[in-house]
Image (spheres, rainbow, N blue to C red):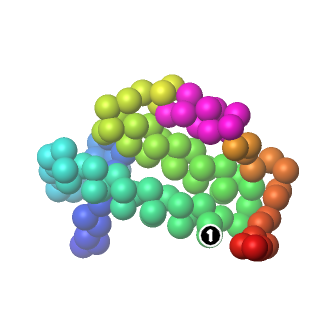
Amino acid sequence: MPTYHKLVRDRIPAIIEQSGKTCRTKIVDDNEYREALQKKSYEEFEEYIQATTDEQAVEELADLLEVMHALARVHGVSFAEVEAVRKEKADKRGGFLEKVFLIDVDEK
């Protein structure tokens, strides 16, 4: 029997049971939830890095975005508030659209 010990999407247990299998789950407390989301973000990012097609990459980006929405709620803000902070930073410091790669800085 495979053991996972990881956060899964809300409907995964029902999907597992619909396939004729059984699973054990638990509801975690707020601290465990934050930690599980943090681990999940690494898991989803690693899956994005390993994607070999644009389609796979977009699927993994969608998963990362879902985790980011949940993390925003954990920190007591809406995703719109996170987006506002992102926009403010982009206005002040720019984004990553121009592909600027910093080599070094001379500290004269």
Magenta segment range? Answer: 82-92
Where is residue 33 shown, x and y percent of the image? Answer: 24, 49
Where is residue 28 shown, x and y percent of the image? Answer: 17, 49
Quarter of the figure with residue 48: bottom right
Identify the residue at horizontal 25%, vertical 64% (top origin): 5
Say whether residue 16 is visible. no
SS majority, magenta: helix
Say whether residue 108 is visible. yes
Whether residue 40 sits left or right of residue 49 in the image: it is left
Where is residue 55 shown, x and y percent of the image? Answer: 71, 52
Identify the residue at horizontal 46%, vertical 43% (top origin): 68
Nearer to the camera, 9 or 70: 70
Quarter of the figure with residue 39: bottom left
How many C-alpha atoms fall within 10 Å of the one at disc 1: few (<14), some, or many (≥20)?
A: few
Quarter the C terminus occupies: bottom right
Q: Is residue 80 magenta?
A: no
Q: Which residue is mark 1?
A: 50
Total labels drawn: 1
Quarter the N terminus occupies: bottom left
Answer above or below: position of 50 versus 34.
below
Nearer to the camera, 11 or 104: 104
Disc 1 residue type? Gln
Where is residue 97 shown, x and y percent of the image? Answer: 80, 47
Q: Is residue 91 magenta?
A: yes
Answer above or below: position of 34 versus 2.
above
Identify the residue at horizontal 31%, vertical 39% (top origin): 74
